[in-house]
Image: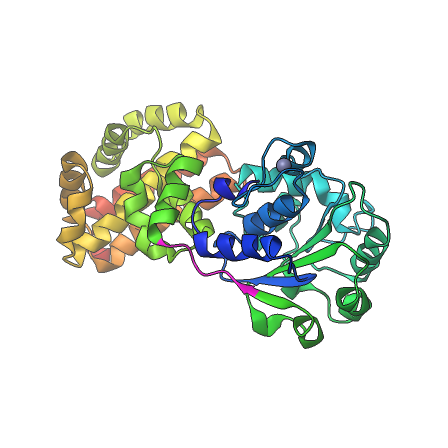
Amino acid sequence: MQFLEIIGQENVKRKLIRTVLENRVSHAQLFLGPGGSGKLALAIAYAQYINCKSPSETDSCGVCPSCQQFSKLAHPDLHFSYPIILNREKKKLISKDYIKEWRSSLLENHFYISLNEWYAKMESEKKQGVIGADECNEIIRTLSYKSYEGKYKVMIIWMAERLYHSAAPKILKILEEPPEKTLFILIAEKQELIISTILSRTQIVKVPPLDNDSLSSILSTQFGYPDDEIRLVITAAGGNAIQAKNILEETYSGDISSGEFREWMLLCFKLEYKKLNEFVSKVARTSRAKQKQLLSYGLSLSRYCLLTIYGRHELMSIIDKEEADFIVNISKFLNEKNALNYAALFEDAILHIDRNGNASVIFMDLSVKAGMLLNPVISESTR
Ligand SMILES: [Zn+2]
C-alpha cells in the first residue's frame, strides 16, 4: 500500500512523510479518528514507506522487495494485533491464528472494515472480540526478535480500545522502551476508551473524517458504484467510507431491471396468484445475491414512497422518470403507517434470505403481504 493508493487524507500523509524525512519517527503513535476515515491504510502505507529500499520524498517506491511484500501484507517485519474471538477448541487464541482471514478481509475491502464486519469474517455468533493476555505476550515475544530486513519492525494494533484492561499493563514497558527500530502504531476511534497508561505513552496522529470528494472517489474507483447512486448516500455517510459502503450495499439495485420489480408489484397489487407463483419460482432459482438485490431495490423504493408521502418531492428528481411515476402511483395506496410496514416487508425478507431461509416461501409471503397492503379494498381496515 503506497500513499498514492489512498484516496484523500493528504494532510495526514504529508505530516507522516515529514516525520520520516526529518528523522523524527516517534516509536509509539496513536492514529485516532472516526470509523471509515482510512486510518488502517495510512498506518500500513506509513510502515511501508519507512521500510522501503528506495523511497522518494513523497512515497514508497512500490517495486522493491520490501514494498512487494507489504502489498501482500506479508512483510516479515509487519505485524498486526486486532481483536479476535477466542476459540479454545480450535486453538485460535492470538491474532496470528486469524491472519489469513485478516489479510483477505483488508484486501477485499480496500482496508475499510468495521469491527462487526471483522467479527463476521471470523464466523462467530459472539459479538465481542478482545486483544487479550495471550496476545499481549505474543506482542512482546514477536518484538523481541531482530528485524528481518534490518529496517523497522512495525506492530499495528487495530482497535486499541479492545485491549483487555487486565492484559494491557503487560505491554506498557515495551511500549515505553521498545527494542531498537521498533514502531508501534495503535489505531482507535474513541480516545476515552483507551487505557490512560497506554494513551500517555503514545503520540497522537489525528485522522479526520473523509471529505465528500475523496469519499465519492473511493466509492466509485475502489468499490465500483455509479455516481448517481453515490450522490444519494454521500451526505448521510458523514465522511465514513465504511458506512457509505454499507448503505450502498443495502440499497444499490445492481443489474436488476426496475421494470421487473414494477411488474412484480403489479401482480401483488392484483393478487394474481398464478402469475405470482411463476414469478416467485423464477426468482427462487436465481442466486441469493440477486434475490437480495431485488429486495434491496424494493426497500429503497419504499423509502422513496415515504418521502413522497411526507411531501419531499424534490428528492424525486434524482431518479429516472419511470421509477418516479411508479413511486407516485404506489404511494397513492400507502399512508404514513402502512408505508413503514411496506418497507419492513423488504427488510424482513432480506434478513431471512441472509439466514438462508427458503426463497420461494420468503418471496411468496412478501408478495401476499404486499398485495394486501397495496390493495385498497383488503387493506381498508388498516388505513
Ligand atoms: Zn520500495
Q: Position of residue 6 (x, y in %)?
A: 48, 44
Residue lying farthest to the front in this orientation: 22
Q: Quadrant of ligand 1?
A: top right
- In the image: residue 233, left or right of residue 332: right
Q: How many marks?
A: 0
Q: Which residue is at the front of the view, 328 or 357?
A: 328
Magenta stretch bounds: 205-211
Q: Is residue 195 visible?
A: yes
Q: Residue at x 20, y 51 (%)?
A: 334
Q: Position of residue 90 (x, y in %)?
A: 81, 44
Q: Which residue is at the front of the view, 36 or 357?
A: 36
Q: Position of residue 66 (x, y in %)?
A: 69, 36
Magenta stretch prevailing secondary structure = loop
Q: Is residue 375 above or below residue 276?
A: below
Q: Is residue 223 visible?
A: no
Q: Which residue is at the front of the view, 362 or 204?
A: 204
- In the image: residue 312, left or right of residue 215: left
Q: Position of residue 29 (x, y in %)?
A: 64, 62
Q: Considering the image in quadrants, where does the N terminus appear? A: top right
Q: Is residue 89 above or below residue 108?
A: below
Does 297 lie within the magenta span?
no
Q: Which residue is at the front of the view, 35 or 365?
A: 35
Q: Considering the image in quadrants, where does the C terminus appear? A: bottom left
Colour treatment of the image: rainbow
Q: Is residue 319 above or below residue 203?
A: above
Q: Residue at x 80, y 46 (%)?
A: 147
Q: Residue at x 14, y 37 (%)?
A: 321
